[in-house]
Image: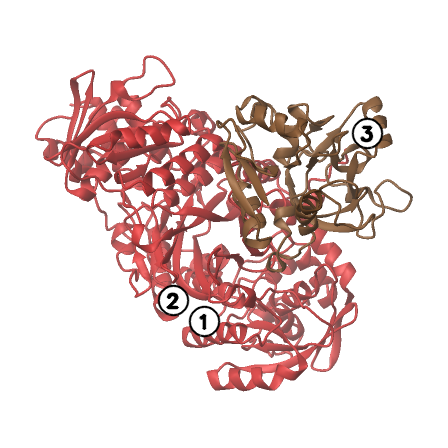
Chain colours: A brown, B red
Amino acid sequence: MTFAVVVFPGSNCDEDAHHAVTDVLGERAEYVWHKETDLKGADAVILPGGFAHGDYLRTGAMARFSPIMRAVRAFADAGGPVIGICNGFQILLEAGLLPGAMLRNRGLKYRCEHVYVRVEQTDTPFTCSARPGQVLRIPIGHGDGNYFAPPAVLQKIEANRQVILRYTDPDGRVPGAPGVDDKWNPNGSVNAIAGICSERRNVFGMMPHPERACEALLGGTDGRVILESLVAAFAGAR
Amino acid sequence: MMDSQVLERHGLKRDEYDRIVTFLGREPNLTELGIFSVMWSEHCSYKSSRVHLRTLPTEGPQVLQGPGENAGAVDIGDGLAAVFKIESHNHPSFIEPYQGAATGVGGIIRDIFTMGARPIALLNSLRFGSLAAPGTRRLLEGVVAGIAGYGNSIGIPTVGGEIVFEPCYAGNPLVNVFCLGIAPAAEIIKGVASGVGNAVYYVGAKTGRDGIHGATMASAEFDENSAEKRPAVQVGDPFMEKLLLEACLEVMKSDALVGIQDMGAAGLTCSTSEMGSRGGVGIEIDVSLVPQRETGMTPYEIMLSESQERMLLVVKRGREADVERIFDKWDLHAVRIGEVTADGRLRVRDRGTPVADIPNRALTDEAPVYRRPMSEPEYLKDAQRLDLAALPPPSPDGQAALLGLLASPTIATKRWAYRQYDHMVRTNTINLPGLGAGVVRVKGTDRALAMAVDGNGRYCYLDPRRGAMLAVAEAARNVACSGGRPLAATNCLNFGNPERPAIMWQFAQAVEGIGEACRALGVPITGGNVSLYNETDGHAVYPTPVIGVVGLLEHADRVVSGRFKAAGDVVLLLGEGRGELGGSEYLKLVYDQVRGVPPALDLDRERALQDLLVTLADGRLVRSADDCSDGGIAVTLAECCFGARGIGADISIDAAGVSNDGRLDAAAALFGESASRVVVSVGADNVSRVMDQATAAGVPVRVIGQTGGTRLRIAIAGRVTIDVSIDDAERAWAAAIGSYFEKKIA
């Protein structure tokens, strides 16, 4: 299986995603420069973390104008799996490939630490190898990860089961529920949303960094299941 | 003839001016005077410090590049080099904390990638006034946000560091930043110009009026007018730096490059004259070709601007198009602004008209060197006197004192700060911040690099020579605790006004101490930075040498962290406590005194201890290792207990016989800061092997207890003095810094 890792000039997790896919999972990955116009026949697309164009205006706001995004949209329209991680998630929101928007973190500060997320749905190419309700310990690293959607949109994505990952405490309990400290929601996201997919379930954005949790040496391997799901879904589809 | 006011504004003395006239054989024009003033500033010329720095050990089989280039480099095997340096941005950070700190990070990153290395880790060492004092929170918040804003954006993890709070830094915070990168050992790039006729290129951000005379500002004391110097602080653009970083590394791979240097302090002036001087050639440029952000800039302003994110390149003839193509890819515009000449002079033109013509060597190697007068400070004899018998009985007692120390901002966890730093990007970080030395694996190899920055201004205030030795020892010990064999060091020397003999004495003593410790511990100095004039209204900071040490682990997965790992492990103390309270955090907290002499240091014993730690880690014989420093063994033991799961311990140590009436013996045992001590935890079946190896290495060793339970109990001479729940202790330690900032939002 071949992944395309899209490289914007300010991407800084592109090499990490490439490393996780190739050196850890043993799959193939190709870098695709943002000025390019085709995805070179890749089977899945990763929009990695970083600060695509410096993001001084708004995270991901300019990246949707990069030439490669036309190809990413076409790939998604054809049903191909696209995963946006952190800044990649922000770009998917700005590009309109996913609903909602990102606000500044509730605490107004950048936060880098391990968090817990619960897998809400497993009928996606990004979570098909996970157990429903499985709690993953994965790092975040962002200043603008406070997911927001207006009530109508929120209601719709919840009803459509598009919320794929939710921040929880280590036992999988959602912050805000009785007896569960709100500190487990690291950025104030509405409904503790950490990751959502598109209506067709083939475009997925998540704020935590699965590529940072693929090796025991780095303190945990819970992120692997996201990338392994993509590999399994691809194998299953063939 | 320049009048004395003009000279004073340029920070030049009359005899220095006379020297300029001699070099030129004529009076300088104003542009030339400006060029001399920045190159001969303390910041660029090291004129007060050079004679002392020459005494430092800089060589060793592992050293690939010593001082004199943009950064030092050491061999780490597999054909790779670790390139690293530390630098200060103290003065700008006081005037504008966010941008001052951010551009400090930007500057040190450029120093590293200029050498052809990809930066993979950052550390920082910060000092502020008391956290309770007005102004400190604004400075701390701004500096931390600035470091985060720059490092996070460019995607280099901040993997460790230190933050110290002490009143002497209130008017003059210290912001020292360290960066480490990896390069193929055979492909280290130098900041050297050569090849007459080769093109000189300018690339990066446009030149503005920001930062003019920044180097001169960093070479003067502060007073009530310092806020007016704000325009001399530069503004950082990490996205531009990211583009420069990627583009420059790509250009370096292309074999089209002769040399490259970043434009840091003294901007275009420094980069042109230093590159020319190193290569024994001249450089001629035309400032009208320099991309400018503002209209009407004079040659003087263009030459002295310290606008950030700019690089100067010398390109091989015939390869210009290759280089331009790479920069185009990154949407950067590389502009040819001049060429290399044969005559060793810096020639500046403006639309063809000559505006400056100076021999390069006059600006670099021939800059003034001063052997400034020195004398022992008057305060010293009295400050070193510590009569424990004259102190009132300690209050609070052992347990409350421990909780107080854990909550003292210098000792408390710095999580508030480091969780604002992306410390995991690049997926190499295997010892996260707060666990001792920062450790990153080196992808493509089995190895890892450990790094730590340490300093103790209080010790250096009481004895600069010993204090500096202790700083070297502690940084190297932290690296060794993680399993890294210390390879080399970089230093950042923060002192007051060198024109005062007492300050110069402190400086000379500290450099001697660093030299002696580095020689004994086998860690040569490969570069660094001197920051003088750290004074406001005549009050100097404590003499504060900060030492960064880099070490190598042959096997990344044998890394050791400071936390206890399992219940039932045996706790051992390597080294001996002597109950030394001089200059300790305890003495400050309980008696509000900074007195006495710092702990003694036997460098042979320290070396033996560090060698042992590396051997034990490599043999997978220890589960955790944490050195005893601020707050003594009690604080170390508490920190060993903290962690996701929190593991308690039952400990028994001897009293320290330090006072006739015995009333401080327990406190001295718990909180004395004797050097060369490390607490290790060991699986029960490995205890005898560890003890045998320690004994064979000549390192004192004894079993002091066992891990387990949810409480930390410490008995002194059989009497339980501390019995505290890990949760309570950790709460005090975890909440301290954040509590100063707590604002409940939503």
Q: Nearer the viewer, residue A26 or B715?
A: A26
Type of the residue with mark 2: Ala
- Is B729 on the left-hand or right-hand side of B489? right
Identified at 15% across, 42% down, the residue is B280
Q: Nearer the viewer, residue B652 or A194?
A: A194
Identified at 74% across, 60% down, the residue is B729
Give the farthest residue toward the right: A178
Q: How far separated are the C-alphas under marks 2 and 1?
A: 10 Å
Do residues under tags 1 and 3 come within 8 Å of each other at their CB atoms? no
- Asked if badge 2 and badge 1 are on a common chain, one would say yes
Say the numbered circle drawn on residue B517.
2
Tell me where residue B715 sits by quadrant.
bottom right
Badge 1, how many Cα within 10 Å: few under 14, some, many 20+? some
Q: Is residue B480 above or below residue B578?
A: above
Q: Is residue B165 above or below residue B557?
A: above
- Is B112 on the left-hand or right-hand side of B591? left
Query: Residue A124's spot in the image, x, y percent?
Result: 75, 40
- The residue mark sitting in front, 1 or 3, is 3
Query: Residue B312's spot in the image, x, y percent?
Result: 29, 33
Type of the residue with mark 1: Leu
Q: Nearer the viewer, residue A80 or B490?
A: A80
Say the numbered circle drawn on residue A157.
3
Say the numbered circle drawn on residue B601.
1
Identified at 46% across, 67% down, the residue is B554
Q: How far separated are the C-alphas under marks 3 and 2?
A: 63 Å
Query: Residue A188's spot in the image, x, y percent?
Result: 76, 35
Tell me where residue B193 sits by quadrant.
top left
Badge 3, how many Cα within 10 Å: few under 14, some, many 20+? some
